[in-house]
Image (spheres, grey):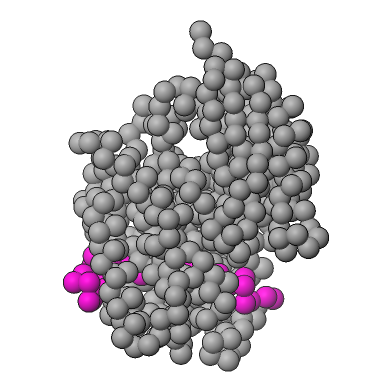
Amino acid sequence: MSDTRIKQIHGRRVWDSRGRPTVEAEVELHNGVKARAIAPAGASTGSGEALDLRDGGTRFGGMDVGKACAAINGLISNHLAGLEIGDQAQLDSRLVALDGTSNRSRLGGNAMVATSMALLHAAAASAGQPLWRHLAGEKRVRLPLPEIQIFGGGAHAARRVDVQDFMIMCPAARSFGEALEWTAEVYRAAGALLKKSGNLRGVADEGGYWPVFGSNEQALDTLMQAILDAGLRAGEQVGISLDIAASEFGHSGRYELALEGRTLDSDGMIDMLGGWLDNYPILSIEDPLAEDDPEGFRLFTEAYGSQCQIIGDDFLVTNASRVLAAAEQGSANAVLIKPNQVGTLTEAHAALQAGKQAGFGTIVSARSGETEDVTIAHLSVGWDAGQLKVGSFSRSERMAKWNEVLRIEESMGSDACYWGWEALPIKRASDACN
């Protein structure tokens, strides 16, 4: 019988899409299997997130990861060596206990999530299965609805516009592949519009266009025109998705819209976003209020939750308890799942399952600091998450993940099924496969 015990785990410094250090963990089993995974890093982060372990000082702006790599090579490897690879929950539980802190500050959330993902890859490789199939088991799973950035703003683009992500979703597509085809046309059309108007300033952290707009509404209008120029029908075939990332400019119920030079209270934010919902085919809004404004979240969800997906990111930080509390309070109807927000895949999956239990939309998400690692593509399928948010339709660290889901879709053959409209927790008839 093949020996599937862990032989050792090695941590190394690699580089993310912003040219900053990050952590890669490589698991080696006694049967010779090796598997690795890389931790991402966020720019817009919630206060309840797991903390990355960074070295501080002046080297690489204090962002080096020598301490996190040492944690993997020492404490983590020594603690997990000799254990069987198969039980992900048990291995993750040991990581959590070894860290022993509420915010993952001893080992570092970056060291923990890289290790957790690498352990899962090693288990799948030992079983001779693709990662998504290893997760799905015998269950039939579907291809996720992609949420793809066209314009980048907020913390991802030096606050050129207040809203962090202007995205599109293609729920009416007949397949994941067709959703990407439609997105490619919208992305191309948006670039042409910006070039023609002289508003193009390159691309932002996640690959979306980095434009110069005079207002947030101008960005929405341009996005609408790009959908039209791509030959698609806004609202019917393609919808708009926004990540407001309100915690970046809102605190204690006050929101500073720097682009427009005005300050709004919670009611003012809700009214502004409600106006956008009335005037544009917006299907999803992420973090419409700040993480310290739960009453604002509740009021917004009460008013618009039947017509729009309302996602908690900084507000819920991939925490199952927070998700269940939000469901009870009616303060969101969807949750973003970022494994590095909690530190292990088991905890991330618990948050996703809590969302499903509550009838929420569940979206597996990348971070603004990404790499060639494609783990989340497999999680979105194997966990049957419903939605996947990776960033834009450019830059290889983004395209690697979209392309991996295309490969998965192809491998499914006639069993391939696309979530489409059913991925969204809003009232609409659907003819999606079941």
Q: Is residue 327 visible?
A: no
* Residue 141 highlighted magenta (yes or no): no
Q: Foreground: 319 or 364?
A: 364
Q: Quadrant of residue 44?
A: bottom right
Is 389 situated left or right of 279 in this image?
A: right
- Which quadrant would the C terminus be assigned to in this image? top left
Q: Quadrant of residue 197?
A: bottom left
Residue 210: x, y in percent?
A: 46, 76
Please provide the residue range marked out in magenta. Answer: 227-252
Residue 176: x, y in percent?
A: 28, 51
Please tell me which residue is depicted at 26% across the width and 51% down the height of the picture.
177
Is 187 situated left or right of 344 in this image?
A: left
Residue 351: x, y in percent?
A: 55, 46
Residue at the extreme right of the image, as rendered: 57
Residue at the extreme front of the image, as rendered: 59
* Residue 251 highlighted magenta (yes or no): yes
Q: Quadrant of residue 70?
A: top right
Please tell me which residue is depicted at 71% across the width and 50% down the height of the picture.
65
Please tell me which residue is depicted at 41% across the width and 49% down the height of the picture.
401
Is 42 situated left or right of 219 in this image?
A: right
Please tell me which residue is depicted at 52% across the width and 81% down the height of the picture.
160
